[in-house]
């Protein structure tokens, strides 16, 4: 048995797709912009799940006990009240919530870069102007941030939740980074409480400092490689070259296996979108995070 594998680049051979479009606003200045993900989620080797005995792809069906497979259009949002009781909400009711930040990203405050703890940074995005007319104002904001050394803060609604965001210059453009809210960051003190606060031994501290100085160099991310991913690719290449390695061919139009409970969520969501006449590229890959303990 062999799992069918694929490693693909999300942006390979295709243009980047905007995850948000709207206005970047600074006081009375509005700039038409697009927001694009700055990372590539498909840059590493990934696998599909294959049913060993049949050699077919494992699929995901949304099911209800006693009913079986159900339609996506019949699914409501349930907010848990406790004791297995849920408040039922129509998806259209959630979509109808009106927030200005769905189309406008206003920079409402500016802070020094060092004022934001690394704990709060989540994911990076590129902000780009949509046309030549927007470029002039875009460059003014970029250069003003560069000259002041400040980071702009604002909120933006994207992928089903309102994000706190920080904006800073990045090369010729602007980088936006989503930030965690205060109640999403755990307090560190309970975890560090047992660590003694006594100063380190001076001799040991001196040696450690010399080691740090010796290994200090400008940051170059290209120096670091994902060795696990490289090892996976080497193993896959060796197996591809070996004709004795088991293989399977998966039929695209085959009948879905009954009772499959191992998930292939992306395939199921794409099938649902096609059935609804929507583009598969609009799938949300990540659900909104549940708030965690408030920082102390």
Image (cartoon, rainbow, N blue to C red):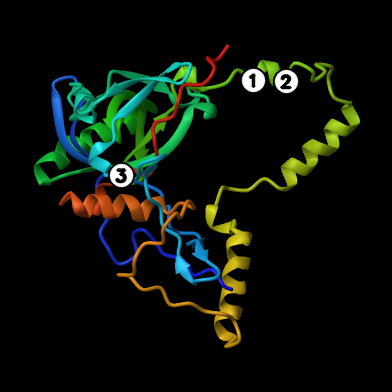
Mark closer to the chain start, 3 or 2: 3
Question: Is the Cβ of the residue at disc 2 closer than 8 Å to that at disc 1?
Answer: yes
Residue tagged 3? 70
Residue tagged 2? 192
Q: Position of residue 154 (x, y in %)?
A: 31, 23
Q: Quadrant of the N terminus?
A: bottom right
**Image height of 258 relative to 35, above or below:** below
Of the two numbered discs 3 and 2 in the rendering, the one whose residue sits closer to the viewer = 3
Task: Report which quarter residue 93 is drawn in.
Answer: top left
Left or right, residue 148 beside residue 224: left
Of the two numbered discs 3 and 1 in the rendering, the one whose residue sits closer to the viewer = 3
In-front residue for pair 33/287: 287
The circle drawn on residue 188 is 1
**Image height of 122 relative to 48, above or below:** above
In-front residue for pair 23/211: 23
Does the image show residue 241? yes
Mark closer to the chain start, 3 or 1: 3
The CA distance from mark 3 to mark 1 is 44 Å
Question: Is the Cβ of the residue at disc 3 closer than 8 Å to that at disc 2?
Answer: no
**Image height of 153 relative to 215, above or below:** above
Does the image show residue 17? no
Q: Position of residue 252 (x, y in %)?
A: 33, 70
């Amino acid at each position: 048995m062999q799992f069918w594998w694929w490693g693909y680049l999300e942006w390979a051979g295709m243009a980047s797709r905007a995850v948000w479009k709207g206005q970047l606003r600074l006081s009375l200045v509005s700039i038409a912009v697009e927001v694009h993900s700055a990372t590539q989620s498909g840059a590493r080797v990934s696998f599909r799940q294959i049913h060993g005995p049949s050699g077919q792809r494992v699929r995901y069906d949304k099911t209800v006990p006693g009913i079986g497979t159900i339609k996506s259009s019949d699914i409501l949002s349930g907010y848990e009240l406790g004791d297995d009781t849920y408040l039922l909400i129509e998806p259209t009711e959630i979509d109808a919530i009106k927030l200005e930040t769905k189309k406008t990203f206003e920079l409402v405050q500016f802070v020094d870069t060092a004022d934001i703890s690394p704990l709060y940074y989540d994911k990076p995005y590129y902000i780009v102007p949509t046309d030549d007319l927007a470029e002039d104002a875009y460059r003014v904001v970029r250069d003003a941030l560069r000259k002041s050394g400040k980071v702009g803060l604002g909120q933006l609604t994207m992928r089903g939740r309102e994000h706190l965001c920080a904006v800073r210059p990045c090369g010729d453009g602007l980088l936006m980074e989503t930030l965690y809210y205060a109640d999403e960051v755990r307090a560190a003190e309970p975890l560090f409480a047992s660590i003694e606060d006594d100063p380190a031994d001076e001799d040991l501290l001196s040696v450690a400092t010399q080691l740090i100085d010796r290994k200090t160099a400008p940051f170059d991310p290209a120096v670091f490689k994902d060795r696990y991913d490289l090892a996976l690719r080497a193993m896959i290449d060796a197996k591809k070259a070996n004709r004795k390695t088991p293989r399977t061919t998966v039929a695209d139009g085959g009948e879905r296996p009954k009772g499959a409970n191992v998930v292939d969520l992306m395939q199921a969501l794409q099938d649902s979108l096609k059935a609804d006449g929507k583009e598969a590229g609009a799938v949300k890959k990540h659900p909104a995070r549940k708030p965690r303990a408030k920082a102390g």
